[in-house]
Structures are given as C-alpha cells and as structure tokens.
Amino acid sequence: MKQIFLHRTGQPRLLLFFAGWGADEHLFPYTPPAGYDLLLCYDYTDETFDYSLLGPYTEIRLLAWSLGVWTAARTLSGHTDRLTQCLALNGTL
C-alpha cells in the first residue's frame, strides 16, 4: 500500500486515514486539526505497511473509508495500543 504524509510537522498526535478504493492523495487537500500530523494510506495492491511511521506518535486517531475500513482492520490488528479513536465510514469488515 502507499503511505504518504499530507501534513507532517512533528506533532505528537497522528490522524491516520485509510482511503477507499480508487482514492489517492489528490482527493484530500485537507489540513488536520492543530496538534496532528496526517498520514494517508491508499492503493492496497500491495498490503505492506510501514509500522515505523507510527513510531513517534503518542496518540493515533484512525479514520477509514470504504475499502479502507477492511484494510485498516486487517493491517492494524495487533497494533491498536495507541489508537484513541476509530471511525469507519461506509465500509465492511
């Protein structure tokens, strides 16, 4: 999968967004709330996830949309210790 920071300024908290099928970084010209970096995951043709990108964050909020709901559940299983909030939109587990 592709992982790209849409906003990265060294904040202590992360908004982790698993996008839906066919989405890319151009669909989300979004600035996260103050105090958050924003990491977008998309293009799930390769299921490899770089967990080291989550390393510096003390709090992670997960937002998953469409196919991203299934992918996030599969990818983050066993890595939920810093997830403080999870929101699934229009997806299936």
Image: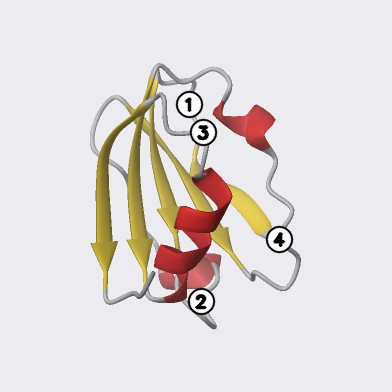
Pointers 2 and 4 in contact (C-beta within 8 Å) = no
Residue beneath disc 3: 79
Q: Residues within 10 Å of mark 4 (few under 14, many from 20)?
A: few
Q: Is tag 1's residue or tag 4's residue first in the polypeptide sequence?
A: 1
**What is the x, y in percent for residue 14?**
40, 32
Q: Quadrant of the N terminus?
A: bottom right
- Looking at numbered disc 3 in the image, what kind of residue is underneath it? His
The residue positioned 54% from the left and 56% from the top of the image is 74
Between disc 3 and disc 4, whose residue precedes? 4
State the separation of the CA atoms marked 1 and 4: 26 Å
State if disc 2 and disc 3 touch (CB < 8 Å).
Answer: no
| Picture residue at 30% right of the left edge, 43% below the top | 32
Residue 73, given in percent of the width and then of the height, sits at 45, 55
Nearer to us of marks 2 and 1 is 2
Question: Which percent across, then down, holds residue 10?
Answer: 49, 20
Disc 4 target residue: 47
Mark 1 secondary-structure assignment: loop
User: Counting residues from the N terminus, which is met first, the one under dot 3 or under dot 2?
Assistant: 2
For badge 2, the amino acid type reads Ala
Q: Position of residue 4 (x, y in %)?
A: 60, 50
Mark closer to the chain start, 2 or 1: 1
Q: Which mark is residue 23?
A: 2
Spatial separation of the CA atoms under disc 3 and disc 2 = 24 Å
User: Can you tell which mark lies on residue 9?
Assistant: 1
